[in-house]
Structure formats: structure tokens, C-alpha cells
Amino acid sequence: MTEKKNMQGGVFTIDAINLVNQEGESVDIQNSVLMFRLYESIYNKFVTGDIHIIDGLDLLKNFKIVGDEYIRISIKQIEGMGEESAEEFSIDRDLKVYKISAINRVDQSTQSYVLKVCDPRMFTARNTRVSRVMRGSYDKMLQNVLIEEGHIPTEEFVHWEDTKPENQQMVLPNWTIDKFIDFCVNNSDKGMADNATYQNGMFFYETLNGGFCFKSIDEMFQQEFPLTFSYGSRQGDTKTADIDANADGGVNTVIESIEHPQRADTLRGMIGGAYASTQLTYDPIRKVEEIDLYSIDEVFSRNSEGHLSGHPMIRTGGQNEVFEKVLTTENVVDAKVSPAVSDKDVDTNLGYKYDAVRISDTRMIHAYDNATTLDEEETFKGWSAKVDTAKLERRAMLEILQQNRIIITIPLRTDLSVGTVIKLDIPPPQSSTGGVDIADKMNDNRYLITDICVNGVPADKVGKLFIECVKESYARKIADYTPLDNTAAPRKV
């Protein structure tokens, strides 16, 4: 009997790829699917996908595909030495067709097209309106609406966090569920008593192998995938085939390609409020304007351990010196010698450019009670009653998550989800000589997964996973890290 070997990564099994039309007629379209792509993101409320069809049966006509059908996709990654994964690590989704596009005639009897699909609850969330008074914490309000108006079963809430305060009150003025989700996400807060990394740092999203999550960025940073993914070929490694496909060193833990769309954009970060900003809040009762300032320095000093790696991705805590070139006869002639420099000016650090972003708001206290004095505790708080840096911090957090991004490609596996931390073993693009340690100690290669694309080819039962990750902070303070001290002296030409 031949011993099983894990020679190829990204192998999966297919339980079903079926299409069901509005008449209840079902057809197995596995042999007609050229490729499928399924998407999940911490920024998207519902999962979506693309089904690429090569059709020689004229399914568009015979099954009356008009854009209101359902497709069930059920796939499982390979575990161990060929076993299927458990249910909690598999993808089994009923998705609704909402768009038919890219129809091309291949030959006399064949055509190709793409079916765009999404979770059916996306339709419900966008066309169901709610008009009623809501009380309690935002997480309880949101869950109540999703269960009663959105008809989402409670077992599909796989991660749900409590938020503060618990005495909010608001009137839903004929909002769609989709709009109310956005409102709750943007205004919910774990509470400073829990030492939140960022105020208003909540996300609502759906995962392909789980369900709906209402999760704070604090929890995301604490949930780390147990395996390390490494970059580099393993073709010469004879031991890889004998290891569980999804274990450390297995064929599904190799990083096949790396793309770094952006490492930093400090101009966008500055004007987007990533580093510093100001909020002006007018109180119509007291006739005064309150000023709140946000600074990345203060956020990291408040709770450095709560961040992904602990230190801001810009220089903070002081002033940046700006230099000017001093041109002389000697260094103008010799192109190999850098011009001398002298201090020209001193520029304020990015973390203190408060005027880069200024937002205005109003505060109406005691909007929902009959208090006779302004200093009384509010029985119920209106959504505009909170005055602090929460809105500024959420704006900054979202902008910071766009600064340092990396996209990796690994073999398809169905046990990864967005909203978790992934550890990548990526060697520096530099040759080591003389036993010198060339590792980047500032970047610990821990990233937060924000987007996943599951890309599968049913004919081969092999696929890939495209993962977009972000670096929210560095492992060392930029000003204190001196990597050149550990390298060999440059050779003189």
C-alpha cells in the first residue's frame, strides 16, 4: 500500500456547487464552474463572491437565470494526510445571484459569464426599514434589530462584544438596517474602563467559515492564528510531504508570493487624521464650544500593549529637524560625495499637527430626560451627548490601517478568517555575510488580516488564498532602532 504524501498545497474537496432557480429546480454546476472567488473583509458586512461559468448547456435559458437564484458552495480543506477538515474549518454557504456579467461567446455551442453572488441578508439589510425607539447599549440595539428585522438566527453571531454606555437612547427615523449597522459600528465603544486601544474601535463583518462578528480591534490584536507562514520554495525539502498539510512546515503554510502595495503615506495620513486632529463641539445650552485634541502619541502611551506591536509607525515625541543642502565647490565637483547639510528650520512632529483635520459637532445634553439642572446624571444619553476624542480616534484607526499593507498568496485553506493576527516568516531582501544578523527587529512580521479572497478551480480541486494584511504598529521605536550598527561596514569603492 502506497503511503499518503502531501505533495501539493491548496487541495480541497467539493461537497456541492449547486444552482437553484426560483422554481426550485436544482442543477449541479461543478463541471461548468471554471473558477470561483469568495470574499470576506472586516470592512464589509456580508460575504460576496464571483462564479466564473463556462456554459455549454445554455443554463441562462434552460434554468431561467435572471439574477435572483441561489448557489450553494460547500468546500473543505485537506487535513493530515488527506482527511477532510471539520465543519468549523470548512466553507458552506448559500449565496444569492445578484448580477450576471461579462457574457462572451466562446464558440458555436459555448458561452462564458460571471455570476456575482452575496449573502442573501445583504438584500434584507438594504431594503428593510426600521422606525422605532431604541434603548440600551449599541451592541444590544444592533443585535435586536438583526434578529427581529434582519431575521438572522442567534447561532450565527459567532463573536459579539458588549459596548458602553448601556443607557443610550435613540429614535430610528425610518433607517435601513444597513444604515443602522454603520451607525452602531461608528459610534460603539468598549469603554475606557477596559483600557481600549482605540475608542470607537468596533467592526461588523461576516466570515466565510463562521458567521457574523461584532468585534473590537482590541480583540483582533489578541487573536493570533497558531501557525507561522514562511516565504520561500520547499521543493528541496523532503520532509514537507510527510507533514500535516495545514501544520507548521506543511505544504499549506508556504507563502507563494508577496506584494507590498504601500509601506507608508504620511501625507495622506496627516490630512486623513491618522496622527493628530481636532474636534470642536458646540453646546447650545451653555453657549460654549469645547475643544478635544487627538494625538497618536497619547493613544500609544495610554495603552502600548494593546496595539499590534506597540510603537507608532512614525517618529513621535519631539520635533522633526528640516535640513538644507550647503553647496560648496568641492562637493559639487565630486558627484560621489553628498553635499553638506545644516539646520534650516524645525518642523512640528506629525503627531502634533492638530489643525490638519478639524471636525465640528454639537452636544445636546439631557435630550431624553426631564433634568432640572445641567449637572445631573443623564438617565438616557443621546448619540451626540458624548464629547471626547472617540470620533477622532476611530478616524485615525481606519487611516492607520491603510498605511502599511501587504498582500500574500498561500495555498487554499478554509480555516483562516479576517479579524485575526497572522505571523509571517519573511526574510529580508538582503544577503547575509559574515554571520551578520540582518533580521528586521523593528518589524516583527505580525499582521492583522483585513481581507481574504478564496480562489478555487473545481476541475483541479486546487486553489489559492489571497490575503491582505496591515501593520498597525512596529515592535521597536523608530528613533531607538539602529540597524546599521549590526551590519558590516560598507566597502569603499
Image (cartoon, grey):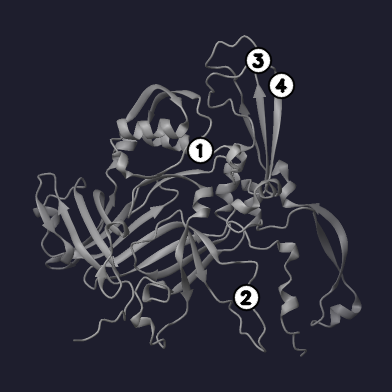
Q: Is residue 404 visible?
A: yes
Identity, as a three-letter code, of the amino acid under mark 3: Leu
Identify the secondary structure beneath mark 2: loop
Q: Is residue 227 above or below residue 4?
A: above
Q: Quadrant of the N terminus?
A: bottom left
In three-dimensional space, the C-alpha distance between marks 3 and 1, rounded to whole angstroms, equals 27 Å
In three-dimensional space, the C-alpha distance between marks 3 and 2, rounded to whole angstroms, equals 58 Å
Tell me which numbered mark, 3 or 2, is placed earlier along the sequence: 3
Identity, as a three-letter code, of the amino acid under mark 2: Ala
User: Label 4: how many residues lie within 10 Å, few (<14), some (14-19) or many (20+)?
Assistant: few
Among the 4 quarters of the image, the one containing residue 191 = top right
Q: Is residue 402 left or right of residue 376?
A: left
Residue at numbered disc 3? 374
Residue at numbered disc 2? 439
Tell me which numbered mark, 1 or 4, is placed earlier along the sequence: 1
Badge 4 vs badge 2, beta-carbon distance below 8 Å: no
Tell me which numbered mark, 2 or 1, is placed earlier along the sequence: 1
Identify the secondary structure beneath mark 1: helix
Q: Nearer the viewer, residue 81 or 315?
A: 81
Residue 186: image tag: 1
In three-dimensional space, the C-alpha distance between marks 2 and 1, rounded to whole angstroms, equals 38 Å
Among the 4 quarters of the image, the one containing residue 322 = bottom right
Pinpoint residue 400: horizontal percent, then vertical percent. 59, 52
Residue at numbered disc 4? 288
Tell me which numbered mark, 3 or 1, is placed earlier along the sequence: 1
